[in-house]
Amino acid sequence: MGIFKRLFSIGKAEAHSVLDKLEDPIKMTEQGIRDLKEDLNKSLQGLAEIKALAIRAKNDNAKFINDAKTYEQKAIMLLQRAQTGQLAPAEADRLASEMLRMKETAEQEAQRTAKELAMHERSVATVEQNINKLKSKISTYENELRTLKARAKVSEATKNINKQLAQIDSSSTIAMLERMKEKVARDEALAQSYGAIALEGKTIDEEVDKVLGTSTQTDALLELKAKMGLLPPTTPPAESGSSTPPTP
């Protein structure tokens, strides 16, 4: 099972530096899983062969046990025929002895095949246990691979964003903003300068009218309002030196 250590040692903390040097950890992991699946297929093939041996041993064992019983029954039947006079005693003894010898051989073969059957059954149990472990590991590694792929996508996107951010020259950006500020300030000052020039171009009458706030109403409109009594009465200025007579 050295493939397990070789494949997933990258998950250990001390192997992080090795992971950084790998050309493509995802492809290597995928290759490792393919290798494990090949091992699984070989193990399944071996399991089928061992099961076939176990089935054959079981069938042979059952046959030898049945043969031993059959030989014993035949020996009994031969002796019974000798007792009834159907067979000569000497011939019956000879044939019965042969049947007992064959029974003994069948029993020995039954014992041998029983041991083989037990050995094959233990091998089947061991291989099945290893296969189940291998299936579980493959499933676990496939889940980890899916997680690794998702993390790789996120890390790649994050790396690209950070790379773009790192490539932005902050000093040049600040310099560009300063130039923009300087340009805006220059344009504002230029606008104020044009405004001052425009004010200087006004006549003295325009400046006086602006200061005094010349009414926009025409003389004709004022005369019409006076006739209609819409204008407030004007109070003539008091003459200097005049005094109001005392009330008697």
Image (cartoon, helix red, strand yellow):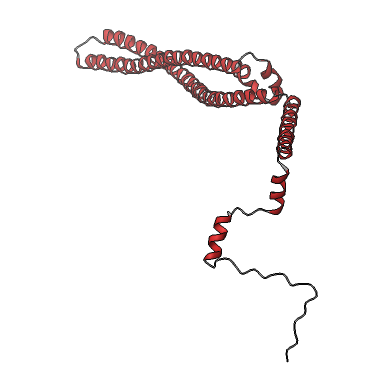
Give the side of residue 185 with respect to residue 72, left or right.
right
State whether residue 244 is above or below residue 109.
below
- Residue under the point 32% across and 11% down: 99
In the rendered image, which quarter is residue 147 located in? Answer: top right
Residue positioned most to the bottom:
248
Foreground pick, 33 / 165: 165
Query: How many numbered markers are drawn?
Result: 0
x and y percentages locating residue 97 in the rendered image: 33, 11
Residue positioned most to the right:
241
Give the side of residue 59 with respect to residue 39, left or right.
left
Foreground pick, 51 / 33: 33
Foreground pick, 117 / 205: 205
- Residue under the point 46% across and 17% down: 120
Foreground pick, 107 / 9: 9
x and y percentages locating residue 9 in the rendered image: 65, 21
Q: Where is the N terminus found, in terms of image quarters?
A: top right
